[in-house]
Image: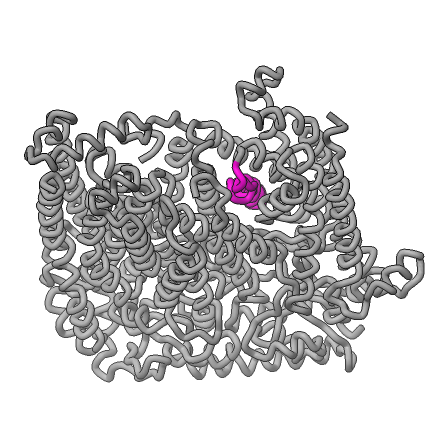
Amino acid sequence: MATTLLSRRMLIGVLAAFGLLAIVILLSLGVGSDNAIGLAQVFAVLQGAGDDQARLTVLDLRVPRTIIGVLVGVALGSAGALLQAAARNPLAEPGLLGVSAGSATAVVVSIALGASLNNLQVGVAIFGALIGCSVALGVARMSGLGDDPIRLVLAGAALSSMLAAVSSVILLTDQRTADEVRFWTIGAIAGRNLSSITSAIPVLLLGLAVALLLARPLAALALGEKVASGLGQRPKLVRTGVMISVALLVGSATAMAGPIGFVGLVVPIAARAMVGPDIRRALILAVLLGPSFVLLADVLSRIVARPTETPLGVISALIGAPILVLIVRSQRLPAL
Amino acid sequence: MTSLSVRFRSLLALLALVTLAACGSTTAPTATTAPAATEASAATIPPAGSEVPAETEVPAATEAPTAEATTETSASGTRSIETRYGTVEVPATPARLVTLDEGALDTAVALGIIPVGGISSRLSEGVAPYIADKVPGIAIVGNPGEINFEAVIAATPDLILTHNRIDEETYKKLSAIAPTIVPTNGIGAWKDAAGEYAAALGKTSELEAWLKEFDAKVADAKTKLAIKEGTTGAVIRWMPQGPLVMGRLLPAVVLIEELGLSLPQVAIDLGTDAPHTDVLSLEQLATVDTDWLFVATFNAEGDGALATAREQAAFGQLKAEKSKQVVAVSAQLWSSAFGPLAADAILSDIVAGVPAAQ
Amino acid sequence: MDRLSLNPTTSAAHELNLAQPFTGQPTGLWLLRFGRLSLLLDRRAWLASLLLLLATVVLVGLSLGSGTVKIAPLDALAALFNQGETKNIFIVRDLRLTRVLAGGMAGAALGMAGCLLQTLSRNRLANPDTIGIDNAATAFAVASVVGVSTTLAPSGMALIGAITMLSLTFALSGGAGTRGYRFLITGLGLGAICGAATNLMLARAPIDAANDAFPWTIGSLNDRSGITVSLLAWGVVILLPLAAIVGKRLNLVRLPDAVAQSLGVRVNRLRFFTILLAGSLTGLAVAVAGPVGMIGLAAPELGRRLAGPRTVPIVPSALAGACFTMLADLLGRTLFSPTEIPVGIVTALVGGPYLLWFLLRTPRGKQL
């Protein structure tokens, strides 16, 4: 197996993705709302020099948000790759399928019950994601999936709008929540403390580990259920695994940054374009490309409307939706 | 083609039936609603005065107080009040007042008139906490987003006070219920808005007396606090992504300025149109780094939001936080309420939060 | 609920059946193939419409008769015909009737739009909530409430938003695509942008303005603008026959394209019209009521249940949509009176569990 994975194309892909990530991380550290602090100051601060303002900006603001951006990107990118492979549907994306909405609704409910945005329980977000995920894959498992990729998306859209309405109910009756949540529902990675997200990191790593374990069975599943069963895989078990893994990944990402759409759509597609459809390769590349996408969107979010920041979720929707339209316009989907 | 036409015919028949039936049940009303609306407004727009004789013939039990209140005064009559939508005749001494704005409620209560109906505050089921115990029996007839017109009718008002954002169509509906005052001023010129409400209530001189007393209180507080020239202060809300700075549209901001605190430039730049800035980037903290910070929070006690803000390193960098000059205040009171009582409450908040003569 | 499935045998059989009338036999093989069922089903569709109409009338009556202010049924009836106390006339005609009309017409429009989209895409999940038009209408309406510089009323802006979105989606999707999928997904994507924009505006707006905008984010029938309501009513009256005709034609598009074309259906043009019609109906509805969810999903389902699988149940869907919306609004304003619950919240709360059941049950008919 290992030898087939390490093709020339894969090597180039991984190197390119690493290069991109490095550039984007530098951008994320060097570009911000405060123009005065560029890369030179960043390096000075990182070597222990720099004035207070620069130290605060770099160490307390930009470094944490870069780290969180990387984590969120890893989580959403790999979750998207997994879901697309498991559903065999290029449109299967945590946001489109209602997984993020499930997670977000759970968070809204918990805030309404008295939690505060800054000490969100990761468990809540994961629980919501799990519900969204199980509904989405429950729908996917129903027959007719293979010949109709849109069914899943429509189910997700219906589920998302229902969950959004549930949130609205709470927001209508609970204005404190409404006021806190309206700043959160668009998703952002700014202003998060590293300490406040430490609980999310183990969950994320666990989800990622499960995802990596699932790569090989999923590749077998791509050959068809019968073949996979013949190869000793158990499709049901694999699907359950995907569900849990996606829930862990999306739940932790949502707990950290709020709902951010389209990452799980764009990243796996880019990954497959670079290294081909094999999930084992695509997953690795998605893990590397996810952070680049999130950070790039975040850097844009800081500079498009200085001195305020445009929420990351808006930027990612602005980037992602046209790509969605492009996918639909291309003839790749069987039923399109 | 035969099968098609057969199917077509059956469909047409069905369609015809349904459209006919639909005409019976729904289209007919369509045709009549337009005249109905105009009729109703035509019939009801000349309010109190013309309505009284017509209504007194068969006074409904619920309307008795209205009729009484108006008949008592209708001889010398009603007073004319200028509003955003023209001159409105109001009863000389309104007996059953409904306030569809928190500022109107505040003003009326301050002037000794307890409304029979009001809207819920944006933060609670009932009216705002700072005023709730003064209006125990008030009927809730809507929320800041929507008015329940039937509940307004059920309250049988003889005067309705609203805010200046009401559109003309809604205004017409309301004035079909009772004379409705839509002021030209809002929270940005709260003293003028209160003046408009007071005029409608026939309490202009009382309001003037009250305002004079309030100005004296402010002057008194100013001498007591003796804030040094050049001391800065800002009213903010703290979001995880960054602060949101309140501007001079809000009475609270005007008040801290009157008491001697200078506002940060971002607050001044807002002018008097927008109540607050967008959420500023945390990298722009320097712009709100003032000596005194009034942090408006939505928790009843105010500690929760402030505690979470304090977990963020950026908040700890603020001058005011370092010198313990952060005052937690109610966002409801400080960023949305207005009126004499609210102003009074805000003033007490400031006097309580800022130690005198530092 | 066994739909015509697309497997070769049945469609071939169907082809045969449809071909039969051309040979000159009147309705012979129709009856033979589907037997008395076909006759029964037509009657069933009829009866379904009548039943739903009855329900509509009852609901209109109930809605006119109930509210925070108690009015005796006879007084309410008199008031409806401009008789009796002025107060009652105002309540029944100006408040309740406008509201019933707004709800009934918006529900009918959404029901029809849902029925058209579902038939076109042969997918029960396709519905006006997911094609982005309501997101756009919401975004524009919120912009009108929140924006200081806009003078247009929210409902006018909502209509403009719906039209903008409809044309944009058409332009970007480059046509309907088979089963309208391209259009649906393009709408979904653009809707996501509008949703993000709405959230952004709400986050930026002062909270009072955000409060004013709230009814537009969930769907409400309180205090609707009279002009838009009558626009919607006329729109529904005019578009209903068109939708019925298009729906009838759509029955043929269930057949393979080649067969449909041989029967004289211009498939692409029909798809275009279907989507244009569904989009216009949705636009008119959301301009009045805001994004009321679930109606476009549930109404055609009930319509199909009652009318049977033979017809495309445009009229039953319209009536079912009207009933659902009026019922939801009636519940919303009477259950916790004097506190009103916006209609969109009621439909979401009632429709949510239904949707879950709908998504997770074992599928019977795979496709429409």
- Is residue B22 positioned above or below B78 on the image? above
| Image-based side of C58 in relation to A62, left or right | left
Q: Which residues are magenta?
A: A89-112
| Image-based side of B41 in relation to C284, left or right | left
Residue B236 rendering spot, x and y as whole percentages:
66, 66
The residue located at (16%, 27%) in the rendering is C34
Quarter of the image for residue A234 reads top right
The residue located at (34%, 61%) in the rendering is C287
The residue located at (20%, 43%) in the rendering is C263
Query: Residue A124: in sight, yes or no?
Result: yes
Residue B274 rendering spot, x and y as whole percentages:
56, 73
B266 and B336: which is toward the camera? B266
| Image-based side of B101 in relation to A273, left or right | left
Query: Residue B143: in sight, yes or no?
Result: no
A13 and B224: which is toward the camera? A13
C34 and C289: which is toward the camera? C34
Asked whether residue A108 is drawn in magenta, I would say yes
- Is residue B77 positioned above or below A261 on the image? below
Asked whether residue B3 is drawn in magenta, I would say no
| Scheme of image coloration | one colour
Quarter of the image for residue A120 reads top right
Residue B76 rendering spot, x and y as whole percentages:
24, 84
* Image quadrant in which the C terminus of chain A is located: top left
Residue A42 rendering spot, x and y as whole percentages:
85, 61
The residue located at (58%, 48%) in the rendering is A262
Q: Main secondary structure of the magenta part?
A: helix
* Image quadrant in which the N terminus of chain A is located: top right
